[in-house]
Amino acid sequence: MKGIRFLGLGPEIILLSVILFLVEFVRGAVLVSFIPIFGKNELMLQLTIIGTAITAHYLTDTILKTFIGYLLDRWSARWIINIGLLISLIGVVLFTWGYHPWLFIFAAALYGVGISPVWIVCLTKVKEDQRAAQMGYLYMIWLVGMGSGPVVLNLILDSKPSWGYILLVSLSSAAWLISFFAPDARQTGALPVPFRKQWEALKARLIAMKPLLPGMVIQTLAASMLVPVLPSFAKEYLSLNATQYSILLLLGGGCTVLGLMPMGKWSDRTGRKPFLFIGFAIFAVMLASLSFKPSTGMAYGIAIILGLSYSAVLPAWNALLALYVPPSQKGLGWSLLSTVEGIGVLVGPVIGGLIADYISIAAVVWISAALFAIIALIYLLFPSRWFAEH
């Protein structure tokens, strides 16, 4: 509790972080384990179909970010979150009929509906003077959920697949029920501003940050390409069983979580550019090294370094984006910036699945690593003024 008070977190953001944890636990379990593993092993689907299902999830998530952000500046956050999570719960329930490929894709798409409101409301509750540190806390919650979901589900799918489905439905239901206690207020506390004027305010910020836009798209593209192939890559190239793969995810995610708040505070003091360049550069090198079929112990060590480098990037990157969000329209601002980031996520899983099916799984890893290296180079070459307060 002392750490929470030190970060200046109010009861609203703490309750929202509980919902966020449950939502991301299920999301991580669904995207990293249930869709790729259950889809391939139980339903015998091609990686292209699995990648399409993941893209369908991100498509609804990304499209709704703009729309939901606009609503959050006008309507009750509680009911927007509640309705979104109810629709997501229906999507999870539909996975039980996933042996029909297109219903499997539709269920994944429907599940994407409820993700955006929780995350965007959390972003609007972050205090400006402690942004990187509080963003570190939120990312810690996100990553603990996102990381523990696949670990737990992997172990369950290995023994009792039906229990895994029951767990996903139960936790989705719990998140929906808790959302009845979410903040019941508009985010800005001000009178609604016409969408056109809000867009003009944000457009000016987007024009100011246009050199950063390629990085926003490339980094989400590089990361999302890996999602449909990770379980197969771990099995075929790293020779990991389900338990070892869970340990790999736990090490990488755990080190990311442990590093988030210290890295966030450090970047608040020293600046964002070094964290973005060094973090992405190390991530690229370590990711590429996995394709050389390292030993299990070496793979665990690489996962630790990957986690720490990711923890350096996340708080600095989101603190940088915060500079371009109009203070009077936080809901719309964060949702539109998240939409820009989501462009890469929309095509990444499909591209990753296609490359894996028609070239090789290792090629996906190499291409992803190359994209992260390009991002590091972009941030190295950018002048420091792009990373300073405006």
Image (cartoon, rainbow, N blue to C red):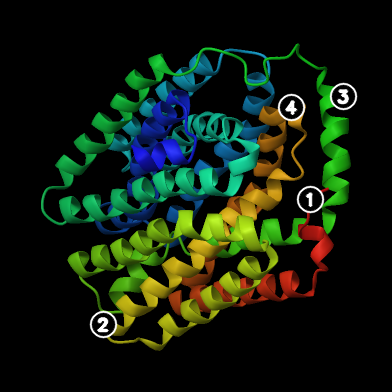
Q: Which residue lies under the disc numbered 4?
A: 329
Mark 4 vs mark 1, CA separation in Å: 18 Å
Residue 174 as seen in the image, left or right of residue 321: left
Where, by quadrant of the figure, is residue 195 drawn?
Answer: top right
Where, by quadrant of the figure, is residue 362 drawn?
Answer: bottom left
Mark 3 vs mark 4, CA separation in Å: 10 Å
In this rendering, does residue 248 appear at all? yes
- Front label number (1 vs 2): 1
Marks 3/1 in contact by CB < 8 Å: the verdict is no
Measuring from the top left, give residue 342's x and y in whole percent. Answer: 63, 48
Mark 3 vs mark 1, CA separation in Å: 23 Å
Residue 390 as seen in the image, left or right of residue 153: right
Q: Which sits in the foreground, 20 or 273?
A: 273
Please, what is the three-letter code of the amino acid marked with disc 2?
Answer: Gly
Mark 1 vs mark 2, CA separation in Å: 43 Å
Q: Which sits in the foreground, 3 or 75?
A: 3
Q: Which residue lies under the disc numbered 3?
A: 197
Q: Which residue lies under the disc numbered 2?
A: 297
Mark 2 vs mark 3, CA separation in Å: 55 Å
Judge whether 379 appears above or below 206 on screen. below
- Residue 389: mark in rendering: 1
- Front label number (2 vs 4): 4
In this rendering, does residue 46 appear at all? no
Q: Earlier in the sequence, mark 1 or mark 2?
A: 2
- Front label number (3 vs 4): 4
Quadrant including the N terminus: top left
Marks 1/2 in contact by CB < 8 Å: the verdict is no
